[in-house]
Amino acid sequence: MSGFASPSEVAEALTGVQYLPDERISQVVYLAERLDKPVLVEGPAGVGKTELAKALAEIHGRRLIRLQCYEGLDESKALYEWNYRKQLLRLQADEGAEWSTVEDDIFSEDFLLERPLLEALRSPEPVVLLIDEVDRVEIETEALLLEVLADFQVSIPELGTIAASSRPLVVLTSNNTRDLSDALKRRCLFLHIGYPDIEREREILLTRVPDLPQKLAEQIAGVVRHIRDLPLRKAPSVSESIDWARTLLALGIDEVNEGVTTDTLHVLLKYQADIDKAAIELARP
Amino acid sequence: MIATLTSFVSELRQVGIPVSMVEAIDAAAAVEHVGLEDREALRHSLAACLVKNAHHLEAFDGAFDVFFSPLPPPGETLETTEGASVGDGGAGGGEADLDQIVAGLLGALGRSDHDSMRAIARQLVGRLAGIQPGRPVGGRYYLYRILSRLGAERLLERLLAEHPEATGLDRRLLEDEYRSRMEAFESMLQDEIRRRLVADRGREAVARTTRTQLLEDLNLSTASRAEIARMEQVIQPLARKLAARLAHRRRHLRKGRLDIRRTVRQSLSTGGLLADPQFKAPRVSKPDIVLLCDISGSVATFAHFTMQVMYAMASQFSRVRAFAFVDGVDEVTGFFTPGVDFHEAIVRLGREADVVAFDGHSDYGNVLEQFADRYGAAITPRTTLIVTGDGRTNYRPGRAPVLAELAQTARAVYWLNPEPRRFWDTGDSVMGEYAPSCNGVHEVQTLRQLETFVEGLAMAAQTHRTIVKV
Ligand SMILES: Nc1ncnc2c1ncn2[C@@H]1O[C@H](COP(=O)(O)OP(=O)(O)OP(=O)(O)O)[C@@H](O)[C@H]1O
Ligand SMILES: [Mg+2]
C-alpha cells in the first residue's frame, strides 16, 4: 500500500481534501493501511462515514467503487451476474451448434456483468471499495461479503477462481440499525465516529461553507451542540449543521440568536416533535 | 509489552467484552506499528482492534487508562506530594491555601488552560483525596470526595457570574462550554487518582475495582435514567440482529425434505431432466405472543424493555398483543402501531392505559381474574403467554388457579421476574404458587438475559420445542 508514514500525515492529506478527521479517525485509517485490513465505520447519520471513504480515494488517487447496500441486495447485484438477454440472443444465433462450444462461449467474459465487488477485485489498479450501509443487508449477503473480504477472491462456477489483482482498501459503513455478525466484525478494524466536538465542527463548517464568518461558525457549532443535548428523536448531524450555516449565510444573517434559530429550526431538525421541543427550549428565559 | 497486552485483553474479557484470538493478535500487530510512546495513538489503535461495539468503548477506555497510564516516578509517596495535607477540618492556613487554589482553578477554567488545569488537578489529589495505601476503594470514591471538598457545584455559578451580560440562549451556551471544561477537569482528576492507585496496588487490582459495567449487564431495575436512555438505543439493533438470525434459520429450515412430486412435475419443462430439485417447506409456525406486564413502580422499566424487545421482533411472531396492569388490566396493543416512536408509546401508555382499578398497588390475583374474564379469548392453543413482574401481591390472594387455567389453553406460559431468585417467595412474593403453571420461570435482570430468553423462545418455536432455558 502506498503508505503514509504517520497518522499525522494521514490527517494532513485528509484535511487537504476538505475532510477534517479527529485523532481517532486518522489513527485508525493509518493502522488499517499498515495491517491491510478493512475498516468498519459506524456512527449516526451524517457524521461523515461515506465522505471518509471518498476522501480516502481522493488522497490515494484511487478510483472509488461503491457498493450501496439495501435490503434484498444479493449476489447478482453485489458480485456478478450473467447477461441472460445477451446469452439468449447468442443461443438463437448459434442454433444447431455443438452444445459444449456454445456453453463455453456464452459463459465467457463477454457475457459477464461485473458488479461492484468483482469490479474491485479485478481492477488492475488498486481501488477504494466502499461497502455503504452494510447493516441493511440480510445475513446471507453479509456472509458473501465476509467471504470476499476473507481471501479477496471469488469463485465463479463457470469461470473458476478469480483472485484480486490488487488489494483494495475497503471501507464498510453502518448506521447500526442491526448488529452485524461477530465474524464480519472480527475481520475489520472498528471505527466509531460520533458528533464532532465544538472546535472540529467549527472547522468543518469553515471548510465546507466558503465565506462563512468565523464568529458565525462558532455560534452555529455552539447552538448545534446545545440542541444535540436535548432528548430528540433525531439529533442534527454535521450535514444538517452545514445546511443550516448555508441557510443563515443565504439569509444574510450575521449573528445567531433565539429568534433566528427558532425560525430556521426546520433545517436542523427533521421531526415536528423535535422542532417543537427545541422551540420550547429556545423560548426558555 | 506482550505480557501487559495479554493481561489487558484478559481484563477486557472479564468486563464482558468479547475479544477473540484473532483480535488479540491484531492488537499485538498494531502495537508493532504504533509503539507505546503516544498513549492516545495506542488507545485508538487497540480500541480499533479489540472493541467492535460502540457501547463497549467506555468500559474499554476505563480499563485502558488503568493498564497504560504512566507510572509515577519512583519514590513518590501516596499522600501529599506538595505541602501538608489539608485534612478534614483543615488548619486555617490550609483553608486559605485552598481558596487560592480554587481561584487559580477558576482562572484556568476561564481560559481553558489545560496545562494549568492539569497541574491543579495533581495538587488537589495530593491534598484532598486522602488516598490511603492498600484500601480497595474504587477511584470514583476519591473523585467525589475531592469534588465535594472543592465545592464543585458552585464553580459553575462562579464562572458564569463573571459574565452578567450573557442572558437567555447566550447564557446557556456559555454554561455548556463551562460544563464541558469542568468535565475535562474532572477527567484530569481521575487520571491523577488512577495514577496513584496504580502505583499503590498495581494495575490488575485497580482494574478490578474500577470496572465499568457493560450496558447489557446493567440491572434493568436499578439503572439510572441516563443508562436507560442508552440501553434503549441498543435494543433496536440487538432485536434486529436476533430477528435476522431467526429469519435466516427459518429459510434454512424451509429447505427441508425433497419434494419428489414437485421435482418431477418441474422436470417436465426440461424434457424430463431432474434439474431443479424442489423442497418441501416444513411447517414452521410463528407463535402468537401475549404479553402481560406489571407496570407498577420498580418493575415498570423492566416491562418497557420487554415490550420494546418483543415489538422490535414482531416480524418473528405471527402476532403480538400486550396487556399492562397494576391492580387492574388493560390492553395496550394499540399504542405500539408500527412506526410509532417507542418512547412516545410508553408515555401515552402511562397516561391513557386504564391499569388502576383500586388503590394502585399491584394485585396479581385481581388482575389474573380480570384478564381471564375480559381477555380470556386472547389465549388460544397457539398462544405463548409471557408474564413479567415480581409476583409481589401486597399480601392479597394470588389466585394461582386462574393462571393454571390459562396455561391449560395456552401453548406455553413463561414468567420473567426482574428480582433475583433468592428473593422469590420472601415477603409478599408468591412466585412459588405461579411457577407450577409455567413452562419456565426466569430471573431476568439484564439485557443479556432478556436477549437469551427471547432468542430461546423464538428458536424453540421454530423447532416445535417449548422448553426455554435461560
Ligand atoms: N470530518 C468532516 N470533514 C468535512 N466534512 C464533513 C466531515 N464529516 C461530515 N462532513 C460533511 O457532512 C456531510 C455528510 O457526511 P456523510 O454523507 O459522509 O455522512 P454519513 O455518516 O455517511 O451519513 P449516513 O449515515 O446518513 O450515510 C458530508 O457531505 C460532508 O459535507
Ligand atoms: Mg453515508
Image: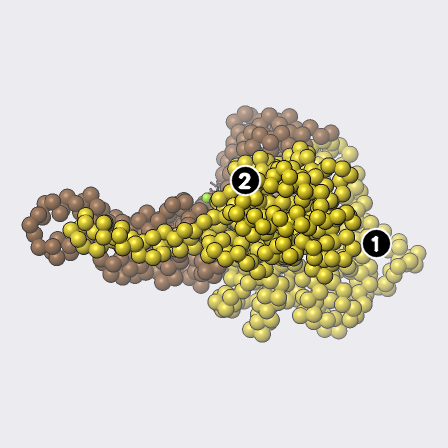
Kindly indicate which chain is depicted in brown in the rendered structure.
A
List x then y, in percent, for residue A154: 31, 59
Relative horizontal placement of residue A53, taking residue B399 as reference (left or right):
left
On the question of residue A188 being in view, the answer is: no
Residue B10 versus residue B142 in the image, above or below: below
Report the chain holding disc 2. A
Q: Residues within 10 Å of mark 2 (few under 14, many from 20)?
A: many
Q: Do callouts 2 and 1 point to residues on the same chain?
A: no
Task: From the viewer's perspective, tell me whether residue B142 is left or right of residue A160.
Answer: right
Amino acid type at mark 2? Ser
Q: Is mark 1 within 8 Å of ligand 1?
A: no
Is disc 2 placed on a helix, strand or loop? loop
Residue B213, percent from left and from top = 65, 58
Q: Is residue A137 above or below residue B331?
A: below
- The x, y position of residue A13, in whole percent, is 46, 51
- Mark 2 close to ligand 1, CB under 8 Å: yes
Q: Amino acid at mark 1?
A: Arg
**Residue B180 as seen in the image, left or right of residue B8:** right
Judge by depth and name the residue closer to the eye, A143 or B50.
A143
Q: Secondary structure at mark 1?
A: helix
| Residue bearing mark 1 | B149
Q: Colour of chain B?
A: yellow
- Mark linked to residue A237: 2
Q: Residue at x 60, y 57 (%)?
A: B440
Report the residue at 46% width, 56% height from top: B463
Specify the quadrant that holds the C terminus of chain A.
top right
